[in-house]
Image: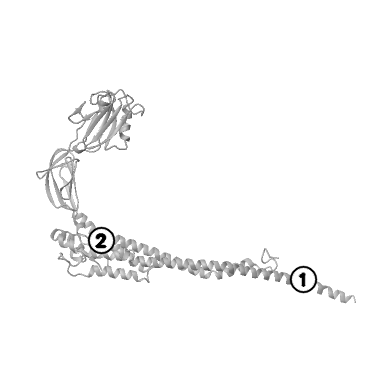
């Protein structure tokens, strides 16, 4: 018969003994779990290192290509007339700008109806924006033959080509207002009507909505479609919108009102200096991360030394760079102090930007030779799918998988070990119990023997 409570027969604390024995058996798992924790910390350390290298590479992006240095600032000298923006394709200079016309959209209103529920008429509206058009059926059965119904039918039309209907209610009543969404003559609004009363252009029923600029106008339009016209250094540019792009390379002009003023385009050296400072900051941050990891989880890892040496080799290599009179960063104001910290000397940087901008650009960005170009490529080698950091991370993740497999196998074995130990103690407990019973019986028999001998 199985013993349900081990130790009942023997008096031994079997559960405690088994627990202590199993603790000994679990020591390999404890060692594996400690190793697992260490590997996880190393993976986290590589994650932080990867993040710093990525930040360093991001700083390189603004210095590793000549186009990144083409940063220009455009200033309108009268923003009430027009505003302006410059792209990397711009060139420094000054431009005379005259806005002779601003772009307008078509906008027309009907006569006043009693209210929004007033019936207008029935038939079909064909609404054009330039050469594009869509049809809207209007009838009582559909419930859209009122002022509000026509507004909703136009706005909800799935084929609407760019027309918005609204209602304005004044002292006279409710006016249906139609407006093209876009400006310019190419988006001019036109409405033709097939009126159920057979009169398609008169000012009654559904045909009161008929409109064509300069042809069918039952009332003066709120605004007529018009293109913007801008003269730049005397050259005329026409646009359907008030945004004029491409007339001057890299320059966008946003016309606002009629009048003349000028635009000044200059290189934005402040943004370039910000990029240089970001480069120095990112380098210092990466260097501090390497220093921290060297005394932390990656102290015995060669990755740190490899990364540090390769970055240092690029920074200190020197040598000629195509298109540049400079060979070292210190010549353009970036230097390393005794602790290895990079700093920017503003006065030197300002002088270089003013005196030899092309050499400055090429020192950083010349293909295969520029310092930022090479550092950007170096970062790719560490961060890529087949890069060194990714390889280390993959190796550590494989270690974690192997550790998980080992722990699983050991835990599976320990189930059998515990079952065997408990069975052994159960057998021992039964044996001790039987021995105790036999001993008690013998003791009773022996205790009775002297009395028997005394009576003989």
- Camera-near label (2 vs 1) is 2
Q: Earlier in the sequence, mark 2 or mark 1?
A: 2
Q: Number of callouts in the render?
A: 2
Residue 140 left/right relative to 322:
right
| Residue 375 appears in the figure | yes
What element does badge 1 sit on?
helix
Residue 171 image position (x, y, % from top left): 27, 23
C-alpha distance separating marks 2 and 1: 91 Å
| Residue 20 appears in the figure | no
Q: Which residue has dot 2 on it?
A: 60
Residue 154 image position (x, y, % from top left): 30, 33
Residue 313 image position (x, y, % from top left): 25, 70
Residue 289 image position (x, y, % from top left): 33, 64
Callout 1: few (<14), some (14-19), or many (20+) C-alpha neighbours within 10 Å? few
Which quadrant of the view contains residue 56? bottom left
- Residue 433, relative to residue 76: is it above or below? below
Q: Which residue has dot 1 on it?
A: 440
* 31 or 323: nearer the viewer: 323
Quadrant location of the N terminus in the rendered image: bottom right
What element does badge 2 sit on?
helix
* 249 or 134: nearer the viewer: 134
Residue 92 left/right relative to 152:
left
**Residue at x 31%, y 68% (from the top left corner):** 307
Q: Residue furthest left?
A: 234
Callout 2: few (<14), some (14-19), or many (20+) C-alpha neighbours within 10 Å? many
Residue 278 left/right relative to 323:
right
Residue 33 left/right relative to 192:
right
* 215 or 30: nearer the viewer: 215
Quadrant location of the C terminus in the rendered image: bottom right
**Residue at x 20%, y 28% (from the top left corner):** 216
């Amino acid at each position: 018969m199985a013993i349900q409570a081990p130790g009942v027969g023997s008096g031994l604390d079997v559960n405690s003994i088994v627990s202590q024995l199993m603790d000994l058996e679990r020591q390999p798992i404890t060692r594996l779990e400690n190793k697992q924790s260490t590997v996880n910390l190393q993976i986290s350390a590589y994650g932080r290192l990867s993040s710093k290298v990525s930040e360093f590479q991001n700083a390189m992006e603004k210095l590793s290509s000549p186009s990144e240095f083409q940063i220009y600032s455009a200033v309108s000298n009268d923003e009430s007339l027009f505003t302006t923006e410059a792209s990397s394709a711009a060139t420094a200079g000054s431009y005379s700008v005259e806005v002779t016309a601003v772009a307008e959209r078509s906008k027309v209103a009907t006569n006043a109806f009693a209210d929004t529920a007033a019936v207008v008429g029935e038939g079909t509206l064909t609404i054009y924006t330039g050469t594009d058009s869509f049809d809207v059926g209007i009838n009582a059965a559909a419930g859209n033959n009122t002022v509000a119904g026509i507004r909703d039918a136009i706005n909800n039309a799935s084929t609407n080509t760019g027309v918005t209907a609204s209602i304005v209610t004044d002292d006279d009543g409710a006016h249906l207002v139609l407006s093209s969404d876009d400006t310019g003559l190419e988006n001019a609004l036109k409405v033709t009507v097939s009126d159920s009363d057979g009169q398609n252009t008169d000012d009654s029923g559904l045909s009161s909505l008929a409109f064509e600029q300069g042809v069918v106008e039952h009332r003066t339009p709120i605004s007529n479609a018009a293109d913007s016209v801008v003269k730049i250094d005397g050259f005329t540019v026409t646009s359907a919108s008030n945004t004029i792009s491409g007339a001057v390379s890299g320059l966008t002009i946003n016309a606002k009102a009629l009048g003349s003023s000028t635009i000044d385009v200059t290189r934005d050296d402040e943004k370039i200096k910000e990029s240089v400072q970001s480069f120095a900051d990112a380098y210092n941050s990466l260097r501090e991360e390497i220093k921290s990891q060297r005394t932390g989880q990656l102290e015995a890892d060669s990755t740190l030394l490899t990364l540090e040496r390769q970055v240092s080799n690029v920074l200190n290599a020197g040598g000629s760079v195509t298109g540049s009179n400079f060979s070292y960063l210190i010549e353009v104001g970036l230097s390393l102090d005794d602790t290895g910290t990079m700093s920017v000397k503003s006065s030197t940087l300002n002088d270089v930007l003013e005196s030899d901008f092309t050499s400055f650009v090429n020192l950083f960005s010349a293909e295969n030779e520029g310092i930022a170009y090479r550092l950007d490529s170096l970062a790719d080698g560490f961060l890529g799918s087949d890069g060194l950091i990714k390889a280390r991370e993959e190796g550590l993740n494989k270690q974690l998988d192997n550790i998980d497999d080992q722990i699983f196998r050991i835990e599976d074995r320990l189930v059998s070990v515990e079952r065997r130990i408990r069975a052994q103690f159960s057998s021992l407990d039964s044996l001790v119990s039987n021995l105790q019973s036999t001993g008690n019986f013998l003791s009773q028999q022996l205790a009775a023997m002297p009395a028997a001998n005394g009576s003989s």
